[in-house]
Amino acid sequence: MTTAQTQELDVQPTPLALLLLGREADPRSERGVECPGDLPSASDPDLVARARAAKEKLGDKVFVLGHHYQRDEVIQFADVTGDSFKLARDAAARPGAEYIVFCGVHFMAESADILTSDDQKVVLPDLAAGCSMADMATAEQVAECWDALTEAGIAEQVVPVSYMNSSADIKAFTGKHGGTICTSSNAERALNWAFEQGEKVLFLPDQHLGRNTAVRDLGMSLEDCVVYNPHRPNGGLTAEELRAAKMILWRGHCSVHGRFSLDSVNDVRERIPGVNVLVHPECKHEVVAAADYVGSTEYIIKALEAAPAGSKWAIGTELNLVRRLANRFAAEDKEIVFLDKTVCFCSTMNRIDLPHLVWTLESLAEGTLVNRIEVDKETEAFAKLALERMLALP
């Protein structure tokens, strides 16, 4: 349908449609769309030299963080690499850096702002670098969920545990309601702590990490878990179902890890005899159950470092990291392949490309602060409380 036909029918685009078209922004969401300024062309042959020159000009004033899922052209300029929480802590450990350039996604930059000093400025090279998982739980939706738990008479028994991959608003909700944050590395410890505080857990926003940790690590049954769908009245659950559940899982998932299937596992075992299947705990429960090894991004890297020469591995995580690991260990005769046949990058992470990084560094070098990520003080206080509870986990 043409624009003229649309106007003739007086069809008004929805807010979501405008957002996807890049014509609006939702300040309460991970999904930013604005990127002011003129970006250099991606075909500019001098991009690498320009990034290097701007970074050298800034010197110790800038500290560049690169997430494991980031593209290689950007990772080459990172002062440190790691997962989201490690990078946020690395930033906090560099109080002398005036600018923290976070080559990751929005919630990661928020976490860095929460943990760094007021004098430090956290910058996200592209404000459109959000996270679909974090977008799946808004503050309003979680407040409605808590109302449903209250009406069911169980809110006082519920301890919220929120994955690091959540917005500052959700972290603040968690802190305000006596809960803690977790990473994929310490989810088991976080859940054990939570069940010492209460009888039930509300796990946000990734249902798969919550389910896999509860069933695989804590020995619960699938029947102990229910899924709260924020798009259905009362989450699609009865008060009786909420009362009977131990784990109330938010209906969220990672768009990358959620793509892996049991067919992927079976297919790779057939194609590569003797292959070790190693997946991230954000994968679906049936994929985790069929894998040989399960662990966080850092776990995956360390497992491959320790793997014997000649071993074969199929990895179920983001493709940029898998490809980087395959290249790194090729000389050691370790065969490393992507678990799925379909190419699957983290699309929002990949918004941080070399042109955006060059534009950011050159702007900062010229004294122009761009794309600052700043969490308001009240949200920061409660979110930091939840993060501190995680740091205090036994």
Image: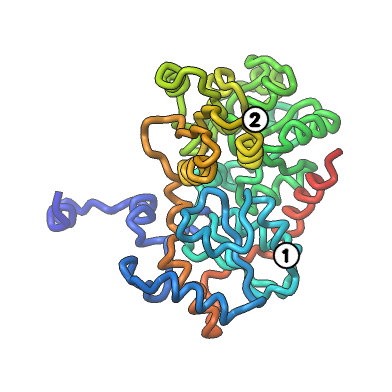
Task: Give the structural element (helix, strand or loop) at label 2.
Answer: helix
Q: Position of residue 378 (x, y in %)?
A: 72, 61
Give the number of the disc on residue 116. 1
Residue farthest toward the bottom in the current orientation of the protein = 366
Label 1: how many Cα within 10 Å (few below 14, some 14–19, many 20+): many
Residue at 45%, 59% in the rendered image: 73
- Residue type indicated by callout 2: Gly
Which residue is disc 2 drawn over? Answer: 210
Is 338 left, or right, of 381 in this rendering? left
In the foreground, 373 or 295: 295
In the foreground, 366 or 109: 366
Q: Is residue 281 above or below residue 367?
A: above
Q: Is residue 70 above or below residue 287?
A: below
Q: Position of residue 6 (x, y in %)?
A: 18, 53
Q: Is residue 160 visible?
A: no
Whether residues under marks 2 and 1 lie with C-beta atoms below 8 angstroms apart, the answer is no
Is 78 left, or right, of 45 in this rendering? right
- Residue type indicated by callout 1: Thr
Residue at 53%, 45% in the rendered image: 328
Q: Is residue 261 above or below residue 96?
A: above
Residue at 63%, 59% in the rendered image: 80
Residue at 57%, 78% in the rendered image: 56
Find the distance from the CA under tag 2 to the CA under tag 1: 28 Å
